[in-house]
Image: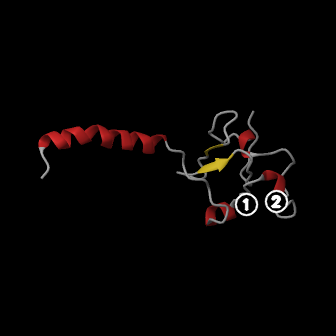
């Protein structure tokens, strides 16, 4: 039998769970997803197939892209091209635009 006191005691737990989920990092982009395939996403820029991605220049990576929304030094961060997902800082895709 649930009483009002038990319910009120559980309210902080529900709030803490919601906050923990809000702070949890977004799942990483799956390189095999259709969107990632279309954009030529590679989880490690040093392994880009230059025959398939002629725009790639050595040294480019998501961390240096204007679209990367992570902080400097972050291992991963959000990208507006992949809503709800995070990209690896060392990754690369054909939408790369050098940060100025």
Q: Please name whichever residue, 68 or 5, is drawn nearer the observer in this view of the structure.
A: 5
Among the two numbered marks 1 and 2 on one chain, the one whose residue lies closer to the N terminus: 1
Which residue is labeled 1 in the image?
Answer: 40
Which colour style is shown?
secondary structure
Compute the Cα span from label 1 to label 2.
7 Å
38 up-or-down from 10: above or below: below
Which x, y percent locates residue 60? Answer: 80, 45
Which x, y percent locates residue 85? Answer: 57, 52
* Residue drawn at x 87%, y 63% as measured from the top left: 51
* Residue drawn at x 74%, y 36% as measured from the top left: 99
* Residue drawn at x 69%, y 39% as measured from the top left: 66
Which residue is labeled 2 in the image?
Answer: 53
Q: Helix, strand or loop at disc 1?
A: loop
Q: Quadrant of the C terminus?
A: top right
Location of residue 97 by image quarter = top right
Which x, y percent locates residue 75? Answer: 68, 42
């Amino acid at each position: 039998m649930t009483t009002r006191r038990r319910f009120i005691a559980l309210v902080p737990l529900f709030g803490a769970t919601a906050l923990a989920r809000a702070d949890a990092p977004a799942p990483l982009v799956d390189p095999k997803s259709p969107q990632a395939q279309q954009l030529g996403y590679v989880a490690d820029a040093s392994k880009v197939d230059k025959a398939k991605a002629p725009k790639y220049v050595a040294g480019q990576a998501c961390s240096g892209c204007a679209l990367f929304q992570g902080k400097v030094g972050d291992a991963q961060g959000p990208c507006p091209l992949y809503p709800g997902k995070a990209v690896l800082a060392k990754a690369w895709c054909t939408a790369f635009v050098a940060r100025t």
